[in-house]
């Protein structure tokens, strides 16, 4: 459909107009000499493709992908070689055709870049990225009224409100209660906040602690591109095979869409690290964004992970105490049905206290 894919080139100019006509000077076919024999049937097939609505929509994104590719990790020596840039562009261009629902979105190049660098074979790199997107594509589902990471931002707000009420109240007073300033961290998994090496360290840690041995089954459960929520509580796989975070969720029956993942606690730890500056210097959302942008590439991954785990324990402890005060001191009825991990711990503390 587009011969530039796999040619070693990166398209940064439109190849087609919105009415389906090739843009002037864009076709790679111009490199073919006039005396070369052309196949009339092939030319007719290409002509038919140009007027296909889905093909036109796809081709209109190719130069946008190229513009992002040339800006992605441009400080790395690896991307000084244009052939490496073209490999990144190839994978993203093909993925944008495969995923008809979402296509290509800004930020995907940040997720794909490490895979291109680590996986030499381009086809293998594509399928690694495609499976990664089955886990993360929900981050890019945006409408006019919501963004893909909305549920994660809601959980982040709840965590900060619990562990640092003063900071949460200050952010709310700045009209930042929805925590939209943190969406980039969660959307591209801290690729912009940490150095390349530290971001890879974070990915390794998060995916190890949240590892689920049923992941491959969930990926291939059906033909859709979304990672399915599968009930694994009665699965025969030993809990020892699960990562530390996921093991806790499986024991408690918490579903994927309800849990506070390690990445959310990492985002909370970043906000906590800038607690004083945010409280003293932030007079508006622009100031919040500026303060968070100042940390780009200057955070230590190991310290951030350590702080995130400490925050999780603090959040767990405070959640239990809030639950106890609400149900005992407040005179509310003890919930008859244990629905999550925190409720289980509450009942354990309550009964052992007797």
Image (cartoon, helix red, strand yellow):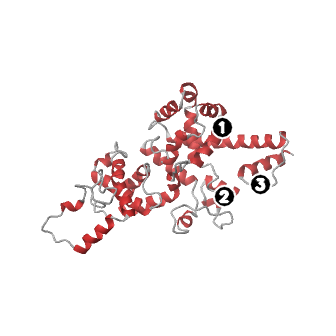
Q: Which residue is mark 1?
A: 161
Single out the mark in the foreground, 1 or 2.
1
Q: Is residue 223 left or right of residue 321?
A: left
Q: Which residue is mark 3?
A: 338
**Badge 3: residue crowd in 10 Å (few <14, some 14–19, many ≥20):** some
Q: Are marks 1 and 2 in contact (CB under 8 Å)?
A: no
Asked if one can make out residue 119 in the rendered structure from this viewpoint, the answer is no
Question: x%, y% of residue 320?
Answer: 74, 43
Report the front residue among 93 and 312. 93
Report the front residue among 248 and 173. 173
Q: Quadrant of residue 266?
A: top right
Q: Secondary structure at mark 2?
A: helix
Q: Is residue 29 left or right of residue 85?
A: left
Report the front residue among 228 and 346. 228
Mark 3 and mark 2 lie on one chain; the one further toward the N terminus is 2
Cα distance between the residues tagged 1 and 3: 24 Å
Q: Are marks 3 and 2 in contact (CB under 8 Å)?
A: no
Residue at 54 percent of width and 25 percent of height: 281
Q: Which residue is mark 2?
A: 250
């Amino acid at each position: 459909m587009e011969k530039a894919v796999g040619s070693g080139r990166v398209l940064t100019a439109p190849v087609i107009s919105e009415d389906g006509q090739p843009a002037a000077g864009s076709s790679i076919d111009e490199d073919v000499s006039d005396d070369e024999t052309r196949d009339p049937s092939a030319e007719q097939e290409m002509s038919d493709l140009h007027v296909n609505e889905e093909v036109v929509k796809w081709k209109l994104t190719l130069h946008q992908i190229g513009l992002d590719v040339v800006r992605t990790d441009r400080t790395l020596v690896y991307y000084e070689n244009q052939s490496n840039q073209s490999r990144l562009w190839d994978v993203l261009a093909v993925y944008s055709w495969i995923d008809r629902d979402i296509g290509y979105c800004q930020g995907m190049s940040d997720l794909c870049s490490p895979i291109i660098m680590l996986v030499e074979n381009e086809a293998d790199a594509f399928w690694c990225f495609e499976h990664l997107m089955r886990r993360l594509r929900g981050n890019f589902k945006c409408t006019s009224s919501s963004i893909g990471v909305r549920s994660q931002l809601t959980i982040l707000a709840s965590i900060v409100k619990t562990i640092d009420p003063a900071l949460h109240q200050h952010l709310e007073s700045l009209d930042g209660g929805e925590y939209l300033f943190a969406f980039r961290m969660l959307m591209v998994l801290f690729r912009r906040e940490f150095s390349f090496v530290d971001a890879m360290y974070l990915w390794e840690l998060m995916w190890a602690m949240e590892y689920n041995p049923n992941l491959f089954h969930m990926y291939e459960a059906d033909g859709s591109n979304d990672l399915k929520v599968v009930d694994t509580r009665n699965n025969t796989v030993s809990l020892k095979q699960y990562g530390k975070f996921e093991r806790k969720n499986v024991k408690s029956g918490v579903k994927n869409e309800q849990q506070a993942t390690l990445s959310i606690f990492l985002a909370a730890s970043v906000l906590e690290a800038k607690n004083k500056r945010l409280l003293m210097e932030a007079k508006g959302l622009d100031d919040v964004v500026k303060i968070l942008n100042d940390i780009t590439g200057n955070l230590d991954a190991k310290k951030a992970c350590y702080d995130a785990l400490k925050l999780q324990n603090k959040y767990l402890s405070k959640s239990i105490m809030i639950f106890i005060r609400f149900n005992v001191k407040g005179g509310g009825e003890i919930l008859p049905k244990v629905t999550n991990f925190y409720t289980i711990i509450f009942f354990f503390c309550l009964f052992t206290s007797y």
